[in-house]
Amino acid sequence: MKDLVRPSRLAPGARVAVVAPSGPIVEERLQAGLDLLRGWDLDPVAAPHVLDRDPGLGYLAGTDADRAADLQRAWCDPSVDAVLCARGGYGAQRVVDLLDWDAMRAAGPKVFVGFSDSTALHEAFAVRLGLVTLYGPVASGADFIKNTRTQDHLRATLFAPETVRTLTSSGTALAPGRARGVTLGGCLALLATGYGTPHTRAGARGGLLLLEDVAEPPYAVDRALTQLLRTGWLDGVTGIGLGSWDRCGSYEELRPVLADRLGGLGVPVVEELGFGHCEGAVTVPLGVGAVLDADAGTLTLDEPALR
């Protein structure tokens, strides 16, 4: 697996488009997120349909066509330096086939930030554009609005990425060892359901896989990991970094599942790296070479996430 193209870091005054490719947005929380970005001396612009709700499927932020159009318009706008997702939820899988990937490739690299359901888009950006993306907080997310650790880590990643090249675990090694690879991953459920589609990689060979999820009971985590094991998607993975498992049952119940499904791979596995659906979640780049040291509990990037 090769390193992907790193977009340029942001500078004061950079224009940031906020889009809603997945679930519907609460306007007050969106405004709070936009105000926070303005406080960083950025120029945030909400996409035209960011506050829409699909008339028939209320769990979607507008129609598939409108959500896709907002994302593509923002990406292809030469005045936009970065695109941030407003929320996770569900729906990103429904827009990836509606995007004009040739036009987006021609627009050149820029920063993309999102997590959870946007895993489908992170994979698509890697497969279709060969681009490093940032698995980080969403603009209307409670953690982004309220938690200074989450804010500070994303801000440093965007403006001074050389200062946040190492993530440190607050847990222990699920499996010992040290490995090198290119980061990939995101939300486990999205990776499992994306398998076999044209916008998800055929496998994690040569990669350091970063995994987290939310509101999936232990048996569902088992099911998703078993799916990836049975399909061979995990063949050749060099190491695994685990993030949060919020509302996935008690960790005492979940940890044996993770050990059972991942321990047999013979690669280092680090717990609790602090990304995902957790308080104070950090931003992790996908597509960058890195070293995972399970014994030290660290993930260290070979180079900054952004140029």
Image (spheres, rainbow, N blue to C red):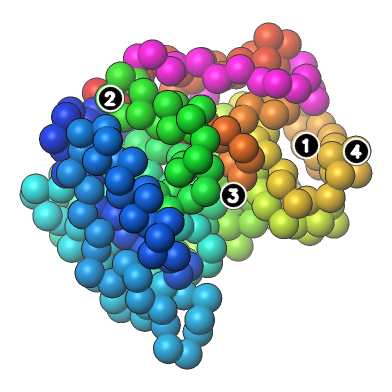
Q: Secondary structure at mark 2?
A: helix
Distance between the alpha carbons at the discs numbered 4 and 2:
38 Å
User: Is label 4 or label 1 in front?
Assistant: 4
Q: Secondary structure at mark 4?
A: helix
Structural crowding at the residue carrying mark 4, measured as other residues with C-alpha within 10 Å and reported as few (<14), some (14–19) or many (≥20): few
The residue positioned 55% from the left and 20% from the top of the image is 167
Q: Residue furthest bottom?
A: 56
The residue positioned 29% from the left and 55% from the top of the image is 18
Distance between the alpha carbons at the discs numbered 4 and 1:
16 Å
Looking at the picture, which amino acid does disc 1 mark? Leu
Looking at the picture, which amino acid does disc 2 mark? Phe
Distance between the alpha carbons at the discs numbered 1 and 3:
16 Å
Judging by the rendered image, the residue that carries numbered circle 1 is 262
Location of residue 222 in the rendering, given as x and y in whole percent from the top left corner = 81, 52
Q: Is residue 139 above or below residue 117?
A: above
Looking at the picture, which amino acid does disc 3 mark? Cys
The residue positioned 57% from the left and 33% from the top of the image is 280
Judging by the rendered image, the residue that carries numbered circle 3 is 187
> Which of the marked residues, 1 or 3, is nearer the chain's N terminus?
3
Looking at the picture, which amino acid does disc 4 mark? Glu
> Which of the marked residues, 4 or 2, is nearer the chain's N terminus?
2
The answer to whether the residue labelled 4 contacts the one labelled 1, judged by CB atoms less than 8 Å apart, is no
> Which of the marked residues, 4 or 1, is nearer the chain's N terminus?
4
Q: Is residue 195 magenta?
A: no
User: Is label 3 or label 2 in front?
Assistant: 2
Q: Secondary structure at mark 3?
A: strand
The answer to whether the residue labelled 1 contacts the one labelled 3, judged by CB atoms less than 8 Å apart, is no
Q: Is residue 133 left or right of residue 16?
A: right
Res 252 label: 4
* Magenta-drawn segment: 162-184
